[in-house]
Amino acid sequence: MSVIENQGSERFDDKILAYLPHRPPMLLVNKIVEISQSHAIAEVWIDEQAPFATEQGVSAVVGIEYMGQTAALIAGYQLEQGLTEPHLGFLLGTRAYTTELDYFPLNTVLQVECREKALVGDSLATFDCIITRAGQAQAGDQESIARANLSVFRKPLAE
């Protein structure tokens, strides 16, 4: 039995479906591990069912979208808690994306962690993000397999 098969019968955590507008096949994060108004940790299951999977795994470039969707979970949580107004989020830029791998291997569970670093008014947010293999030690001790800083533009739905 693979690591992924042990994750249960549901492919996506119900809260992910509530927090994100994404739907398969473009919903890429599978489970919320931890969430608050400025921090989120999500699991991504790399297996044959994962979008963009090939025989080699999933290209590490897709890690940018894993980070973006994990950051978007924070906005979904903030909305649920009444801390923000409904808005669309647009990934404006990625700085310093580094990865140790060309592909995330099949039958791997990734942990994607994003922290809101700064919020400029209501329209621009920046995030520090890291991807590790699930099951590693707590933050700070983790060996990253990818890192980046994201800039996100928040457009209120009322505009």
Image: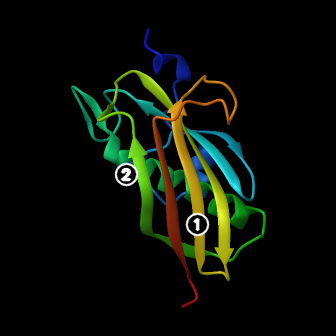
Say whether residue 8 is left or right of residue 145. Answer: right
Q: Quadrant of the C terminus?
A: bottom right
Quarter where residue 95 is shown: bottom left
Q: Quadrant of the N terminus?
A: top left
Badge 1 marks a residue whose secondary structure is strand
- The amino acid type of the residue labelled 1 equals Thr
Quickly name the residue at label 1. Answer: 126
Numbered tag placed on residue 26 in the rendering: 2
- The amino acid type of the residue labelled 2 equals Met
* Closer to the camera in the image, 6 or 35: 35
* Closer to the camera in the image, 120 or 153: 120
Q: Is residue 141 above or below residue 25?
A: above
Looking at the image, tell me whether mark 1 or mark 2 is earlier in sequence order.
Answer: 2
Residue lying farthest to the top in this orientation? 1
Tell whether label 2 touches label 1 (CB within 8 Å).
Answer: no
Indicate the position of residue 73 as horizontal and vertical percent values: 60, 55
Residue lying farthest to the bottom in this orientation? 159
- Mark 1 surroundings: few (<14), some (14-19) or many (≥20) residues within 10 A: many
Numbered tag placed on residue 97 in the rendering: none
Indicate the position of residue 27 as horizontal and vertical percent values: 43, 49
Residue at (39%, 21%) from the top-left corner? 107
Residue at (72%, 58%) from the top-left corner? 38
The answer to whether one can see residue 113 in this image is yes
- Mark 2 surroundings: few (<14), some (14-19) or many (≥20) residues within 10 A: few
Say whether residue 79 is left or right of residue 67. Answer: right
Quarter where residue 104 is shown: top left
Indicate the position of residue 44 as horizontal and vertical percent values: 48, 36
